[in-house]
Amino acid sequence: MNKNSKILLGLACVALSIPLLVSCGETVDEVSITYGALWDNDETAPNGHFYHETSSGVTSYFTTYSRLTSLVNKKENFIVVVLGSSTCACWSNFRDNLLYPYMKSNNLLVYLIKHEEFDATGTERFGLNVSSSNETVAIFKNGILSDQHDDLEGTTFASSYSVFSTWMSERLKNPTMLYVSNAQLDNLYKGQISGVEDNVEEFTIYFSRFSCGDCSYMSTNFLNNYLTTTANLSTSYIIDCDIEGIRANGGVVDQTQWVQWKKDYGMAYAEDNPEGFGGGYVPTLFHIKTNAEGKKIGDDVIDGADVYFNDDFVQNTDLTYSLQSTYFSQARLERQELAYLKSSAVATKILDGVNLGAYEGEESGLYSWYQTQAAQYHDPILKAFLDAYIGENK
């Protein structure tokens, strides 16, 4: 290459780096965000579209340090904004004119955390640049910081939508499984998205709880990877049942309310809802046929189902453990909610009586051992369900 060519290449690098915020030769790591959030124009302003939770009856749109730590430990791919000052005009302008429009266009879920959450001595910052005067937009991959952009004030990153959106789009692959509120879920059963006549004929919903150990295991060890590595997934939905109005009432667990909710949404078994299992458990995934009345139970609504774990496991006389009273019985395999499984190549379709082997550790580790052993059978079934309704076989 001659000298003039090198000069021209250098100028091209400079020119390209300004709008794209990426210098020539720099490798940008694209991150497939694990979970998004279905956008709803009726969310409470100004921060209603950030992830929020209710504690002691008070809703907060700010993420706690403990929740951030949980996301890291669960090895999720997610976006977090560290807030310097909520009263700064530069923040509100950036939020309303750049961040919100991008979130809406891509159904992004963003965690908003105050910089004060990191003030305690010795608090792990996970590589984040934390400041009381500037915001930081950060992307995590498998629970590890992948990229961040801070010092928003006075920058084109914070004032130009094209610059901001380019930076984000280069680094993100948009999520396909979206968190929904209870009201949004009700609309989906009616064939609508956010109350709009969209004629949604079918959808897949994952009933989860952020505080559920089985949900965490399933996500960390299987679902997160499936969602972020499988090509051409169709949109599906997830609801956190720990939220107010479902399992929580005034910020505390309301068991009576929770039991009734599981009956209303088909998670619990009933004569008119044989697709349910026992009193209803998470993790549960349903494939739903919608209807104008918003009906939620019965075989004309639930045509596919998977209940992950929640088996009984009992010790045999030879000290090995076997699965009993599982969702995957011989009788249920003949029903339509497991038609996807019956026609699949899964080797073990009936889990009743499956022997997990002997456990020789401490009593405190027994359930963790059960999860590891049972996952060998539940994971292929879950994959068959996902492949059938949102993946390669849909």
Image: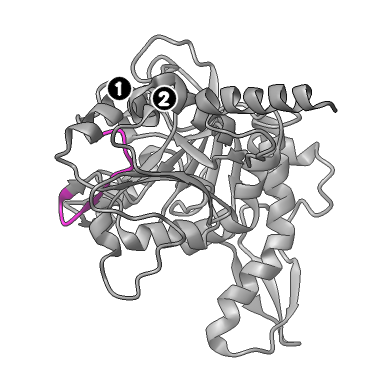
Q: Quadrant of the C terminus?
A: top right
**Position of 103 relative to 147 (above/below):** above
**Position of 240 relative to 12 (above/below):** below
Where residue 188 sits, quadrant-wise, is top left
CA separation in Å, label 1 and label 2: 9 Å
- What residue did someone put label 1 on? 97
Q: Residue furthest front?
A: 3
Q: Quadrant of the N terminus?
A: top right
Q: Residues within 10 Å of mark 2 (few under 14, many from 20)?
A: some
Query: What segment is highlighted magenta in the picture?
Result: 47-58
Camera-nearest label, 1 or 2: 1
Where residue 16 sits, quadrant-wise, is top right
Residue 226 image point, x, y percent = 67, 44
Looking at this view, is 270 or 347 the one in front?
Answer: 347
- Which label is found at residue 102? 2
Disc 1 marks a residue whose amino acid type is: Asn
- Which label is found at residue 288? none
Mark 1 or mark 2: which comes first in sequence? 1
